[in-house]
Structure formats: C-alpha cells, structure tokens
Amino acid sequence: MSFSRFLLRRTLMVIPLLLGVVFITFMLIRVGGLDPVGQLAGPTATQDEFDMIREELGLDKPLWQQFLIYTGNVLQGDLGESWLSNRPVLDDMLERAVISLELLVWGIGLGALIGIPVGLRAAFRPNGKFDQTTRVLSLLGFSIPTYWLGLVMIFVFFYLLDWAPPAIGRISLMIFPPETVTGSYLIDGLIAADWEAAWSATTHLILPVVCLAIISAAPIIKQTRAIALEVLSSETVRYARACGLPERTVRKLVFRNSAVPIITFVGTELTGLVGTMSLIEYVFAWGGLGQYGLNAIVRGDFTAVQGYVLALALFSVVVFLIVDIIVHLIEPRSELN
Amino acid sequence: MAETVSSDFEGDATSKPAFSLKNRLIGIARVSPTMAAGILIILAFGVMALFAEFLMPHDPVSAYHDRILQPPSAEHWFGTDGNGMDVFSRVIYGAKFGFGIAIPAVLLSIIIGVPVGLIAGYRGGLLDEVLMRFFDGLRVFPSIILALAVVAATGQSLLNVVLVLGFLDSPVFARVVRSEVLALRSSVFVESAKAAGNPTWRILFVHLLPNAVQGAMAQTAVRAAWAVRISATLAFLGVGIQAPTPEWGAMIRQGAEFMVTGQWWVALYPGIALILLVFGLNLFGDGLQDLTDPRRRAAK
Amino acid sequence: MSLLEVENLRTHFISRDIDNQIRVAQALNDVSFTLEAGKVLGFVGETGAGKSLTAQSICGLLRPPARIVGGSVFFDGQDLREMPEDDLNAIRGDQIAMVVQNPRTSLDPLTRIGDQLARIHQTHSGGPISTSRERALEMMEAVGIPDPTNRAKSWPHELSGGMAQRVLIAMALMNNPKLLIADEPTTGLDVTVQAQILDLLKGLTERFGMAMIVITHDLGIVAHYSDEIAVMFAGTIVEAGPVVDVFNNPQHPYTQSLIASTPEKLQIGGSAKLGGQPPDLYNLPSGCPLRTRCSFAQEICATPPPRRQINDTHYSVCHFSGKSPANGSAS
C-alpha cells in the first residue's frame, strides 16, 4: 500500500472518533443542569432577558438540533465567546497554544531522555539493585502531586536558594520579549541574537520543565521496562542467544524491537500529560493554554471550558495520528495491516 | 502431607504444609518487600483515619487568631496555617477524606464497570463495539481535566466528586473484565453451563464473574491511588472541596501563596501525607498486579 | 571420544511461592547419553518430558528459575558447564547450531534475512562482511531457497512457514557446525513441507558430516531419520538405543505404548495404553515415575528402577526389562 493511501485511510478513520469527541464535549456542560444563561445575564436580569439570551444561544431548541448547530459551529472554527475575556475562545486558545507546546516539548523530551534509558537498563537486570531502586522511584513519581512538586521547587530554588527567577511568566518582566517567530521566547531570542532575552527565557523554563520531566519520566520508566522485558523473553531474543550473538548485538536487537511500542506508549501518554502540564502552568503562572483552561474551569467560563477540552482531545487525536505515521514508516511489518 | 517424610533432599519443599497467614505475610515480604511496605503505609493511614479524633491534639477547624502562620513548635508540630489552624491536626484529619473519597469511588467504578465488561464481553456484537468506541473516545481526554470539568459543571460537592471519579474510572474495570470474559467465553465450563440450560444472568454472575474478577481486583489499589490523587488535585484548584475543609489538596492550596514568603509548613506537610498514602497504594497495587499477572510474575 | 557426552544431567526449576515455600520442579533427572560425530539422535516423548530442556541445558540457554544442579556436559572434549559465558557464546551458533520451532517469530522481524544470515557468520568468523554475504547466498542455495539474491532482501514476515524454516536451517549451516540441534523443526508445517524439511536436514547432515539431535513428538520422524533414539519420560531417558533395536524390541512399557499407539509408526496420538496426566514434576512419585500410569506396576516399582542393558547399545530403565511381565502381556 502506498504511503499516501495509508495516510488517507488513517485520516478517514479518525472521523468517527472526532464526532464522538465533539459529542462528549457538547454533553459536558449539558449533563450538569447548570444554566450558563444565569451567568451571562447576571443576578438582576428579568425573565424576558433570560429568554432572550436563551434564544440567542439556541438553548430553547431540542438537544439534537443544538448538537447539530454546535457541530456546525465547531467545523467553522466558531467555539463561542469567552465570558471572562469577551473574545472568541479560538483566538484566546491559538495565542496560547505555542506557549504550552514549548513547555510540553522540553518537558516530555527531557522525561523521555531520562525515562527510556533508565527503563531499558532496569529491564536488562530485572530485580537487580538498579531495577529495584528505579522501580520504587518511578512509583514515587506516580505519587507526587504535580502542583505540590512545583510549589516545593519554587520554595527551594526561588525563596531559599534564590537561583530561580520568580515563578511568574516566561521571561523577566524587565526584559522586552524578542520578536515573535516561533512563539518560543528562547528560540526567538536565539534567532534574534538577543542573548539576554534567551537567557531569561531559559531560566524561567528550567523549573517547570524539570517538574514536568520528573512527572513524565515515571510512567515512561515503568512502561519501557515492561516493554523491554517482554522483548527480552520473546522467541526472537531466545533465538538470537541460541545463535551465539554477543550481548551487545542482542541489546541492540532489544532496543530496536522495543522502539515501536515505546513510541506508541509515549504518544498515548501525552494525552494525560497535557492535563498534568496544565497544573504546572497554573503553579508557575505560565500563561499558556493549560492555565487558561484551568482558570476557565475554576471560574465557570463554560464556553472556554468546552473549547479547551475539545482542543486537548483534538491534540491527542493528532498525536495518535502522527505516532501511527511514524510507526508505519519505521516498521516493515505494517505493510501487512 | 508431613507424615511420609521422603528421603530426598527437597523433602520438605515438595510436601504442602497447611496455609498459614504468617507464612503468607513473610512470603509477600520476601517476594515483594515493596508490597509489604505499601500494606504497612496503608494500614498506618487507615489507623489515622479511623482514630483521628484521638490522635489530633487540636480541633482541625478551630482558628487560633493569635497564632497565625506560626512555624512548627512543641505546641503545633507542623505549625499553624494562615487562619491559625493547627496543621498537624488537619493533616491527620485529612486521611478521612483520602479514604472517604477513594473507597466509595472505586466501589462505584467496580459496580458500574464490572457488569458492563461482563455483558460487553459475553454479548459482543454491536453493543460491545459501541461501548468500546465510547471508551476509546473518553481516552483522548486527559482524565484530570475531564474530572475537573465535569465536577465544575455538575455542581461542586463532595458527593459529586465521588460520583464523577467513580464514573470516569469505570472503563478501567470494564476493559479488564471484558478481556477476561472474551478469553473465557468459549471455554468448556461456560459451554457446559449453557448446555445445562442456565439463564444468561446466571452464567454471567455465577460462572463468569468469579473467574473474571481477579484481574479487576488487582487494579483496585492502583485505582484508589488515582482517586486520592485526583480528588486532592480538584481540591487544590478549589473545585468540589473548598478551604478551610481539612483536606490535603485544599490545604496545599491554602499554603501555596506562603511558599514564596517562606512559610513552607502550611503546604509541605499535607503534600507529604498525600504522597505517602498514594505511594503506599501504588506500592501495594504494583505488587498485586505482579502477583496476578503470570507474565510479570515469571520475570521474578 | 564422542562428540557429545552428557552425564547425569539434572535441571530443576527452583522458585519461591507466595507462601514463602521453596518449590522445586525436578525437570531433568540424571539424563545421560553420548552422541558420535555424524550420527543422528532422536529424542521423543510427550510435552513436558524434558526434551527441549535437555537441549537448552546443553547449550547453556536456561533462564531462571531453571538451573542445572548436577551432572556434566562435554562437547568435543570441552566441559560446557564450566565454560565462561563468552566462550560458550562463541560455540553457540558456530559449532553447535540450533533450529527451533516457530521460525517466523524467532527471526529478527526488523532485519532482512540476508543480513541476519551474514550477521551470524560475521559474528563468529570475524571476517569481512562481503565474505559473509557470499556465504549467506551459498547457504540459501544449499537449503533450496529459490532466487537467493532477491530472497535475501525479504523481511521475515514475508516468508511462508516452510521458507522461514529453510532460512533457519541456512542460519544453522552458516558456520559449518559439528552438531545441529533441531527442536521440533517441523511443528506447524504442512505435511508435505515437513517431509521436504526433514529430507533436507538429513541430506545436509550427511553432506557436511554433522551430528544432529532431533527433538520431536513424532515417532515416525525418528524412525525414518535417526540412527539412535532416546525415549524421555518425566525428565529421564527411560529407554535408548539404535533405532532398529528399540523399534523391534521395545523393553520399557512407555516405549511399548508409544509404538502401539502410533498408527503405522507415524504419529503419537493420545497415549492409548498409558492414558493420564503427566506426573507432577513438583511432586514426583518415588521410584519409577511411570508407576502411577503403568498397568504392570507392582510394589517393587516404588524403588528406583535399574538401568538394564538389553545389548551393548540398547538399554531400558525398568524393573521388568528383559523379563516376562512387561513383555508378555502387552496387548
């Protein structure tokens, strides 16, 4: 099967999932029985005003019609208007997406860079000292509340040691941000050769990135170990040993055969990690999509909540798609499927 | 049996002694010391939750207005918070919320998830397909965000937190049970039960359930850890549980602002308690999964 | 000196259960045999009798909780049990080659078969890769793979079962081994393909002067392709000898039942005579392990059965070997 056909088929397969996602987001604020109208109208509104707003929002129509309208709006990129910012939710989110993406890429990248080698090493000597230590540490990583870790890091590195800048925003308030190219202050600073800005952006990045890396490394260690153990006990490895291949070659074989499941796992793990990352953004006042979404949830801005939840789900769907494409490209057997 | 002592050197190993709780506990500790540690931690918190009234030196919600933000001392072991409440007493009382949310939430997940998994796996067909697609759809949402949004939308009360967590986590049990049922569905004992004219509900709950439930049970501790963690996160964001409720997440929220002004004890101690309980549950749960999964066990 | 001398080999599975009890499965109990260069020895027996485990014990391929607890293995005068892991690794795939069942899942799915063939040769020869590649093509030719140059570029998942098994045999031949161990080499293949593979193996052993151990459920295979036979039950060789002697004059009740229940000496069906569960290796009966299933069992069978030579090369481990009860009443 040619690559373009694979791509087309795989993309088409996403459509029912997307419909389901839109449906779940649609139902999200309707299951509660909370009336968004009350919020919009304010406490002094009259019954007429209520009805007017209700009509304006289409809430007087039957549920299925509302769903169709909502789906149509979503398809046109209309996610409604935020009650907090009085701006279209889509604009609010697009502005902030890159900001979050920067944190996500660095954080998960670092997490994978630590987690995968550690997991592999643990698998090669199961129940050895290294394995037992990292196993307990990764379970501990599962147990630490993200926001608490962030707070403790702020306390230690900002208050006690004064190594880190205050945990507000992505760059020092004294510094003018570099010209926007990618949206990442660090990279834009480097591009513009504005070393001061790049350095300030780096110092602001370190704590949240390390925090996210610690939290994301835990599941990656655990799963990488499990995957590598499974490969190690496979017939392929047993046969490789029977062929007298040296340990180095066997290890290389294990790495290569673990690669696809590990990539798939990290891809699925991203879904949960964007949730975790929102909390880090919240604690570090990062100003990205995650902080926007949590604020919307906490303050009851349901249009924004809906948009935010939909955006996260779409992000996962796109990640799954990308993972599938990568797997398709590196896995010779996938032509069979 | 012990009376025929055979002469070969592994004699006592091949004979099977009667079950002894002591041996099983020693066995667990030796096979998995981490699991034993997990059990101890959970028990310790269980004692804290049950006997909080006797262990707390102060009332967890009465404010000493003259002792605001005092550092740890002999009188207030963990210091006092911004309202002048005793952090130590509040941390102990918080254990009640940990168990009080996790246990009913996990029970609810089981009550919903297990029958759904049983029926989906046994019936198969369209019903199964639709359910699985729905669960797949739920999986693209980060669980914490979904929980937050639903609790915020359905009204913020402790009961709602429990209900939402229970519902959202039920697919975990449904999936486990379903896959076990799929494996058992065409087995001899189910076929013969069918041939003997048993009604479907009897086959499901009398014949399949006891065999399929082991995998689900192995998940309980890890899911409880999840519930404790998520409920604390909700409270940290002020969703569902509000300060000054002596719940750990809510306490961390109260202490957050003091982290940059140096009053670390308000947020630190409830965080440690939260980590320990979740860690204990995870250690126990990890051991449980090891014991029930023959593949993971074989690696030992 | 024989090529392979195995003496009193004992392999146990030693583990600790959740009740803190040590559990020992006596999987191999005093397995002894010798194999001369260029000969073919067939191992038969039911699942769990210890045939594959014997092969793995010889090559040092056991994984925990399996462990050799006693005995010795001498290959070509070298003590394999005392050998450091690296030296043993140099022998595996080189002087001792293995052909396993499930060839398609045993090959590395992410490496083209030509590269896998070259890799095993280069690992052991250390020569230039071009030599190894040439050798790979030669061996593919030798095992009857059509169009080797193109086939070398195939991925393992693109091969049929029979073709994959030929690749495995080519892998085994790459380094001119002295001993080839074929563990159920034809399980899961079509009957016609089975015969082709076995004829190929037999022809190759003669052509290259290899010794071969064939492990199988299939008595017919042993009858057709082996010089000698060893019948295993519950981790022991209960009868062994030249194929002709054992088939014409089976002495052990287990061998007799195997032959009797094999229609036209083709396949071991359900064991008709000695039906029943294989013995629990964690709790072997005292004396003869077969006694709980054997219709000739008497009191004496609770004591360890002696090894009785029927002639110079043929022996049986049974109290009644060469005597009347077992022989006479087998019907």
Image (cartoon, coloured by chain):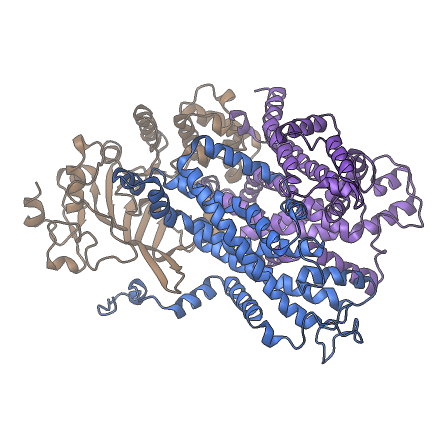
Residue most toward the front? A47
Corner quadrant of residue B291: bottom left
- Using the image as rendered, state which of residue A48 and residue C22 is in the foreground: A48
- Using the image as rendered, state which of residue C119 and residue B3 is in the foreground: B3
Judging by colour alone, the chain drawn in purple in this rendered image is A
Q: Quadrant of the N terminus of chain B?
A: bottom left
Residue B132 lies left or right of residue A159; in this view the side is left
Chain C: drawing colour = brown
Q: Give the x, y percent position of residue A294.
A: 74, 47
Judging by colour alone, the chain drawn in blue in this rendered image is B
Corner quadrant of residue C95: top left
Task: Give above or below for A49 relative to C298.
Answer: above
Q: Give the x, y percent position of residue C224.
A: 24, 31
Task: Give above or below for A260 relative to C203.
Answer: below
Task: Give above or below for B1 relative to C104.
Answer: below
Q: Give the x, y percent position of residue A47.
A: 75, 39
Task: Give above or below for A297 relative to A150.
Answer: above
- Residue at horizontal 21%, vertical 43%? C241
Residue C77 visible in image: no
Q: Give the x, y percent position of residue B271.
A: 68, 63
Residue C31 visible in image: yes
- Using the image as rendered, state which of residue B46 and residue B155 is in the foreground: B155
Residue A306 lies left or right of residue A92; in this view the side is left
Residue A132 lies left or right of residue A191; in this view the side is left
